[in-house]
């Protein structure tokens, strides 16, 4: 798989991503990750959905239910027309300069993005800007504790893998509240057809026994706007005056 250089990282380009997902192996991976995504987001009708990275194989479900969908593919990765036989929903852009108004997007799906972006903090800030209050982001990221981040035979073997704790920290540090997590790809990253015949059974067993050791982690977080609890300046001044005029109010218990 050929790669492109992103700062001090490497990531697959658009040609290799499309070729990978066109293979039987890539379609199997797409099916299992797609099932995990749909378990967290079973529907999005009426919501504006933005995909960042290479997430078109996972957005077919939402396009089919007529949800407003668009996809930002990073300039370093390259972009491709999608969906075929329909109006194009893909644009080439930068994750830290999204061409949307504030509070205009309901959901953001990140695939082959979170681990590859050069300036993660900038992307997080930009997602916060465009998401509506209560809007949600779902990141699909290589698991640091899994086998898939150690294999360069798939796109999940590039970029920075994360642990669940690290993903939660990144979300909370950028004013997102963690709401849900899951995992997928409990099979090892091998192309042995016999093993993939039992992969679905292993996925079910893995989610029950060791839910967060799959090859990829799925972490959902919500943009929440908290009301300020700071006392207004006028009220503080009034309170201070009342304490001075009545010493009993200022006594410690």
Image (cartoon, helix red, strand yellow):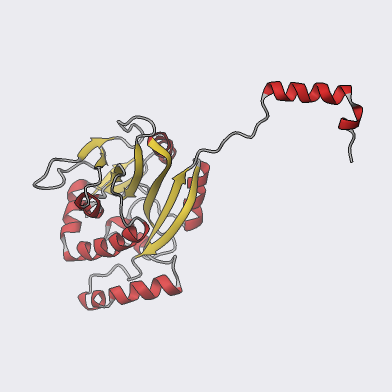
Residue at x 75% of width, y 21% of height: 237
Q: Viewer-proximal residue, 148 or 108?
A: 108
Measured from the top left, where is residue 240 in percent x and y? 80, 24
> Which quarter of the image is occupied by the C terminus?
top right
Measured from the top left, where is residue 35 in percent x and y? 30, 63
Q: Viewer-proximal residue, 58 or 6?
A: 58
Vertical placement of residue 163 versus 208, above or below: above
User: For residue 186, what is the image quadrant?
Assistant: bottom left
Left or right of residue 25: residue 128? right
> Which quarter of the image is occupied by the N terminus?
bottom left
How many labels, in total? 0
Measured from the top left, where is residue 107 in percent x and y? 35, 45
Measured from the top left, where is residue 73 in percent x and y? 25, 41
Vertical placement of residue 235 versus 68, above or below: above
Vertical placement of residue 236 versus 196, above or below: above
Q: Viewer-proximal residue, 129 or 66?
A: 66
User: For residue 188, what is the image quadrant?
Assistant: bottom left
Going by the picture, which residue comes out furthest to the left? 85
Residue at x 34% of width, y 75% of height: 202
Left or right of residue 69: residue 161? right
Q: Viewer-proximal residue, 160 or 186?
A: 186
Left or right of residue 88: residue 118? right
Residue at x 23% of width, y 70% of height: 191
Residue at x 21% of width, y 47% of height: 66
């Amino acid at each position: 798989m050929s790669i492109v250089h992103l700062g001090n990282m490497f990531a697959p380009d658009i040609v290799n991503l499309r070729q990978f997902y066109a293979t039987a192996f890539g379609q199997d991976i797409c099916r299992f990750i797609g099932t995990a995504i749909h378990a967290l987001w079973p529907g999005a009708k009426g919501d504006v959905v933005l995909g960042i990275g290479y997430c078109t194989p996972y957005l077919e479900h939402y396009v089919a239910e007529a949800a407003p969908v668009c996809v930002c593919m990073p300039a370093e990765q390259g972009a491709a027309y999608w969906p075929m036989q329909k109006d194009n929903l893909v644009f080439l852009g930068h994750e830290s300069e999204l061409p949307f108004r504030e509070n205009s997007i309901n959901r953001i799906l990140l695939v082959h993005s979170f681990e590859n972006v050069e300036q993660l903090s900038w992307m997080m800030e930009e997602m916060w800007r465009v998401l509506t209050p209560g809007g949600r982001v779902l990141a699909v990221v290589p698991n640091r504790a899994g086998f898939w981040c150690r294999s360069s035979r798939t796109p999940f073997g590039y970029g920075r893998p994360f642990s669940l704790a690290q993903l939660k920290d990144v979300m909370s540090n950028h004013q997102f509240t963690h709401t849900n997590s899951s995992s997928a790809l409990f099979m090892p990253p091998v192309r042995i057809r016999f093993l993939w015949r039992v992969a679905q059974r292993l996925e079910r067993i893995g989610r029950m026994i060791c839910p967060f050791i799959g090859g990829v982690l799925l972490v959902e977080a919500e943009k929440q706007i908290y009301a300020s609890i700071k006392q207004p300046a006028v009220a503080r001044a009034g309170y201070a005056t009342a304490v001075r005029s009545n010493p009993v109010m200022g006594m410690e218990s």
